[in-house]
Image (cartoon, rainbow, N blue to C red):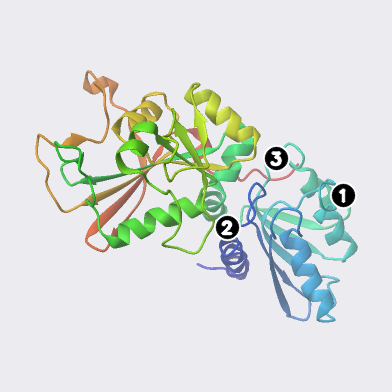
Amino acid sequence: MTTPDDTRMRQAIDSAARVRRHTSPNPWVGCVIECADGRVFVGATEPPGGRHAEIVALHAARDAGADTRGATVFTTLEPCGHHGRTGPCAEALIEAGVARVVTALEDPDANVAGRGHAMLQEAGVSVDVGCRADEVHEQLLPYLHHRRTGRPFVVSKMAASIDGRTAAADGSSRWITGDAARTAVHELRADSDAIVVGAGTVRADDPELTTRLVDGPSPRRVVLGTAPADARVHPCLEWADSLESLLDHLGAEGVLQVLVEGGATVASSFHEAGLVDRHVIHLAPAFLGASGRPMFAGSGAATIDDIRRGRLVSTRVLGDDIEIVIDAVTTDNFPTTKEPA
């Protein structure tokens, strides 16, 4: 049964989704304030340096002349309780006289991590945690992963025929999948802060790696190896060190999500090292046969006991193709709805 709290949190989730591509490295948060007289005001996080979602909603209420005393606040992530580029949202909510705050998740950021909830409770504000936690966990997964590990959330995208081949024997691969799948890939790029390919892919395909098919920012481009001087991938970061050190480097620079779009060798390198958090696989209703090139290079699992399993997240039809999303099975892929102390 859908409760009134669920409905308001759904509004907050939708508000957060609209700013998903413009807040990194900050989380994309949505907030709904329901005043005691029933008036409702919505806010979402602004680009870095701008207002957090709670402040946007509070300012909307203030500009409308609404009384926020006794209001209930629905926010997808714990309000911050520290001074950063902006003041503490928890403090602003207390000053506004709100009576209750409903959040989906506690913020794992070391500067927050329960402090916002504690500040609200100490001021006599009622705090409830866990409303639509699963949905918000999925929505904020790259941010949550980064704050818990220091590394970006790694998404590996592959396109293949239904028999698992990514290219013909001669290496040609354009286009296995159709327009809808290619547009979905550009959506993935827009959702990612950086994109990684191998130098071999750059030499063979000379990709732009932009988001020209959708509305959204193009990610930073990273080439494993050296790109030709005239390659369209420039400007890019050319990386010759380990994949682990690359993720550490990008994480330290605030990159929340990395999209790996390399060929079989790059995909296999990330996969075999256990560095892929999510696989996005687009399968076309086509057959390339035994001579086609496989999704992964290398020998793979020697026996069934060595099989690397994942968790099915979703499937959907993209034109004539099918998208399958699979997560690595780690504790970081599941929500935490711990109540505040």
Q: Residue 85 — which label?
A: none
Give how far across and how far down residue 136 sits, in percent.
Answer: 56, 54
Left or right: 151, with 329 as reference point: right
Are the residues flagged by discs 3 and 2 in contact, CB closer than 8 Å? no
The structure residue drawn at horizontal position 75% and vertical position 68%, both measured from the top left corner, is 57
Q: Amino acid under label 3?
A: Asp
The structure residue drawn at horizontal position 46% and vertical position 51%, both measured from the top left corner, is 189
Report, in whole angstroms, how far the alpha carbon at label 2 lies from the one at label 1.
32 Å
Q: Quadrant of residue 183?
A: bottom left
Q: Amino acid under label 1?
A: Glu
The structure residue drawn at horizontal position 74% and vertical position 58%, both measured from the top left corner, is 52
Report, in whole angstroms, how far the alpha carbon at label 1 lies from the one at label 3.
20 Å
Give how far across and how far down residue 63 sits, in percent.
Answer: 82, 78
The residue that disc 2 covers is 20
Give how far across and how far down residue 45 sits, in percent.
Answer: 69, 60
The residue that disc 1 covers is 122
Report, in whole angstroms, how far the alpha carbon at label 3 lies from the one at label 2.
18 Å
Left or right: 139, with 280 as reference point: right
Q: Earlier in the sequence, mark 1 or mark 3?
A: 3
Q: Earlier in the sequence, mark 3 or mark 2?
A: 2
Dot in front, 2 or 1: 2
Q: Residues within 10 Å of mark 1 (few under 14, many from 20)?
A: few
Dot in front, 3 or 2: 2
Left or right: 18, with 97 as reference point: left
Left or right: 74, with 68 as reference point: left
Residue sitting nearer the eye, 29 or 220: 220
Label 1: state its secondary structure: helix
Q: Residues within 10 Å of mark 3 (few under 14, many from 20)?
A: some
The residue that disc 3 covers is 109
Q: Residues within 10 Å of mark 2 (few under 14, many from 20)?
A: many
Q: Amino acid under label 2?
A: Arg
Label 2: state its secondary structure: loop
